[in-house]
Amino acid sequence: MEYVAALSLVLRGKMEQKLRWYFKLYDVDGNGCIDRHELLNIIKAIRAINGCDHETSAEEFTNRVFNKIDVNGDGELSLEEFVEGARKDEEFMEVMMKSLDLSHIVTMINVRRHSV
């Protein structure tokens, strides 16, 4: 049931709801903040899944994100910093939205359903 609710949110939820859910997902240790290591691992995983080449390394991207949106400079992203940063930084928002883009899976399911 939790999976279905999460899937519904990712597909139909408002941007604020999606960002809050992404934050909880990326906060691996559940301490209420995302540190550099957590974000770096997420960025590496997203890039591995998407299989795209990028101009900047995952490390460079992570450092750029923290330089731009870690407002208080404590080396961690709070929920507020994460949400505001994603709203203000188009590239970061794009990465967050693509990280759980399920449209290719939905397309594959539809194609298989119609071919049977």
Image (spheres, grey):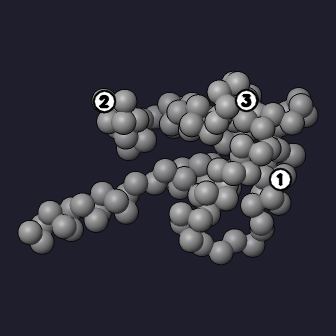
User: Mark 1 — residue?
Assistant: 64
Say which quarter of the image contains residue 78.
top right
Residue 1 found in image quarter: top left
Q: How crowded is mark 2: few (under 14 residues within 10 Å), some or many (20 or more)?
A: few
Q: Mark 2 points at which residue?
A: 1
* Residue 39 appears in view: yes
Q: Is 19 left or right of 77, judged from the image as shown?
A: left
The Cα–Cα distance between marks 1 and 3, rounded to whole angstroms, is 17 Å
Residue at image position (78%, 68%) is 56
Which structural element holds mark 3?
Answer: loop
Instruction: Mark 1 or mark 2: name the one nearer the start of the chain.
Output: 2
Q: Residue 88 carries which label?
A: none
Which badge, 1 or 3, is on the more N-terminal residue?
3
Spatial CA span between label 1 and label 2: 37 Å
**Element carrying mark 2:** loop
Residue 33, numbered label: 3
Q: Which amino acid does label 1 sit on?
A: Arg
**Which numbered disc, 1 or 3, marks the residue closer to the eye?**
3
Visible in this render: residue 80? Answer: no
Side (left or right) of 53 relative to 18: right
Neighbours of disc 1 within 10 Å: few (<14), some (14-19), many (20+): some
* Dot 3 amino acid type: Cys
Q: Position of residue 15 (x, y in %)?
A: 51, 37
Residue 54, above or below 99? below
Give the quarter of the figure containing the C terminus: bottom left
> Residue at coordinates 89% horizontally, 31% vertically from top-left?
74
Residue 103 locus on image (x, y percent)? 37, 57
